[in-house]
Image (spheres, helix red, strand yellow):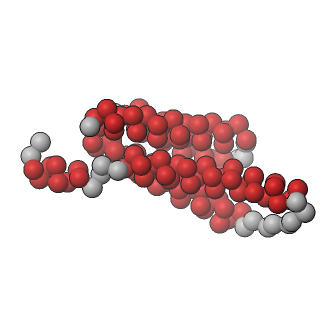
Amino acid sequence: MSGVGQERLKGRRNTSLVGAGAALVAFLSCYGTLGLVLILSLLGVSLSVNETIWSATILSATAVAVLAIAAGFTKHRRILPLLLVCAGAALIFYVLLGSYHVLLEGMGFVLLIAGVATDFAAALKNR
């Protein structure tokens, strides 16, 4: 690869880490908030969560994960991570913006995390 091409890709080396971080933020924003509300309610503390901001945080982090994995695709040229992440994001978006179902939400996060993991493995293999 030419020097110019290597310089262009230099900033994309950590896209797998960005994708993993964004997927973690999305997951923790969803289930971590539920866990925190549950624990606090068991302790007798009432906590009100703005559902619009909560959903926006999850959706934004999911979108960042998809964009990071898409950027990683240009480096390792493996389509599976991008397909998994897009399928997971589609389920998460559908559940949060359309009709909620706990199994679809769980499957969305499983696919999102599986896509990030396969992207991370592809990036390590490509080095």
Residue 125 x/y as whole percent: 31, 32
59 lies above or below 106:
below
Residue 106 x/y as whole percent: 66, 39
Q: Is residue 4 left or right of residue 47?
A: left
Q: Is residue 13 left or right of residue 2?
A: right
Residue 69 x/y as whole percent: 40, 45
Residue 127 visible? The answer is yes
Kindly identify the residue that appears in the image at 53 percent across and 59 percent down: 60
109 lies above or below 54:
above
Find the residue positioned furthest to the front.
43
Find the residue positioned furthest to the right.
44
Kindly identify the residue that appears in the image at 88 percent across and 56 percent down: 42
Q: Is residue 28 left or right of residue 81?
A: right
Residue 77 visible? The answer is no
Residue 83 x/y as whole percent: 44, 36
Kindly identify the residue that appears in the image at 51 percent across and 35 percent down: 114
Total tally of numbered discs in the picture: 0
Q: Which of the 4 image quadrants contains residue 107?
A: top right
Q: Quadrant of the N terminus?
A: top left
Q: Is residue 74 left or right of residue 43?
A: left
Q: Quadrant of the C terminus?
A: top left
Kindly identify the residue that appears in the image at 73 percent across and 41 percent down: 102
92 lies above or below 49:
above
Q: Nearer the viewer, residue 50 or 124?
A: 124
